[in-house]
Image (cartoon, rainbow, N blue to C red):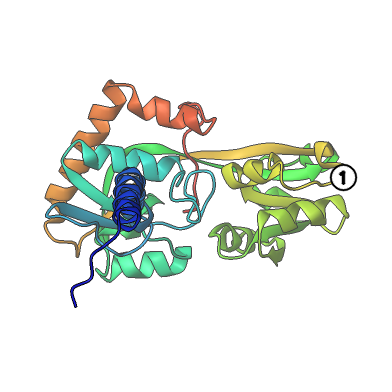
């Protein structure tokens, strides 16, 4: 026997169907927004890996070493001013820059062996000319001694002047080799935060460090070091540095030319300076880094 639906039954089904349609229509924009957000954010996060972004576009991969605030591996949204400057320069040439982060020695090996197109940045050394092409100037390497108070800093004008002191250096920095060559008593530590702690506890006479990451740590609001304001510094060198394109990259001379053209563009249009200002750095300071 054919069943005849009652009016209340038909009304209920129609009402439920209308509610279902309304929910679908109201949820669709939210779902679409979430999709676009995560899909759009993925390439940004991927910039700090070896994964190429989606789409058919020219890409360049430069290995970076963590060195805040110029290179910050754990924050894709604010990766450091070196990284943002290089990305902006390449973007003017319609090239997407990929910036995987590695410890300095591994980054150097990967660039030198042609596994990546080069290094985000490095200092000039004559022996490196056989391995890299240098870009136009990116900034300056500033090296400084740090101490509690100024007494231990008064006689320090260059590295060798600290021969009678216990000197702390972050492990992995090339400053270690310079200090040992100068005959210093070197104590290696794992971070700038440890240098600060050892200075304040009087286990070091002075610390020898690149100024940018040390000052970044001294100003870090998430760390509280009693007596931190007593730490003083004295700059002993201020040297230029560059982006370094591996000679084993595909067409490296053309790549350097594209980068240099991009750097000129963003200097002229003010973007270079605005990126530095975003990180609280003036151009005269230059983006210092590990060499």
Secondary element at image label 1: loop
Q: Residue at x 46, y 63 (%)?
A: 104
Q: Residue at x 50, y 42 (%)?
A: 288
In this view, the residue farthest toward the top is 269
Q: How far from the left and from the top, in percent, is residue 243?
A: 33, 47
**Callout 1: 10 Å neighbours few (<14), some, many (20+)?**
few
Q: Is residue 244 visible?
A: no
Q: Identify the image quadrant of the N terminus.
A: bottom left
Foreground pick, 107 / 84:
84
Counting labels gives 1
Q: How far from the left and from the top, in percent, is residue 65?
A: 46, 58
Foreground pick, 215 / 171:
215
Q: Is residue 282 visible?
A: yes
Identify whether 261 is placed above or below 29: above
Q: Which residue is labeled 1 in the image? A: 226
Foreground pick, 218 / 253:
218
Residue 14 placement, left or right of 94 = right
Foreground pick, 205 / 70:
70
Q: How far from the left and from the top, in percent, is residue 185?
A: 74, 63
């Amino acid at each position: 026997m054919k069943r005849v639906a009652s009016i209340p039954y038909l009304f209920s089904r129609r009402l439920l169907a209308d509610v279902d349609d309304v929910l679908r229509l109201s949820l669709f924009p939210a779902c679409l927004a979430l999709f676009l957000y995560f899909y759009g954010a993925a390439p940004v996060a991927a910039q700090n890996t070896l994964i190429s972004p989606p789409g058919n576009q020219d890409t360049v991969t430069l290995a970076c070493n963590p060195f805040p605030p110029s290179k910050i591996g754990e924050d894709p949204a604010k990766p450091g001013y070196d990284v943002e400057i290089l990305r902006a320069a390449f973007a003017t040439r319609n090239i997407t820059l990929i910036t995987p982060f590695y410890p300095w020695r591994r980054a150097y090996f990967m660039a030198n062996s042609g596994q990546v197109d080069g290094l985000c940045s490095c200092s000039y050394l004559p022996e490196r000319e056989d391995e890299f092409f240098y870009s136009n100037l990116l900034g300056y390497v500033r090296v400084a001694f740090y101490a509690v108070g100024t007494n231990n800093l008064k006689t320090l004008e260059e590295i060798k002047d600290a021969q009678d002191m216990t000197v702390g250096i972050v492990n992995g920095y090339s400053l270690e080799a310079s200090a040992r060559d100068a005959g210093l008593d070197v104590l290696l530590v794992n971070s700038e935060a440890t240098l600060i702690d050892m200075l304040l506890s009087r286990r070091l006479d002075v610390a020898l460090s690149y100024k940018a990451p040390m000052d970044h740590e001294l100003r870090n609001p998430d760390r509280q070091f009693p007596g931190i304001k007593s730490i003083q510094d004295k700059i002993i060198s201020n040297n230029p540095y560059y982006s370094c394109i591996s000679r084993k990259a595909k067409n490296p001379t053309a790549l350097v030319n594209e980068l240099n053209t991009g750097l000129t563009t963003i200097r002229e249009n003010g973007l270079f300076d605005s990126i530095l200002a975003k990180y609280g750095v003036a151009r005269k300071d230059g983006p210092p880094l590990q060499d």
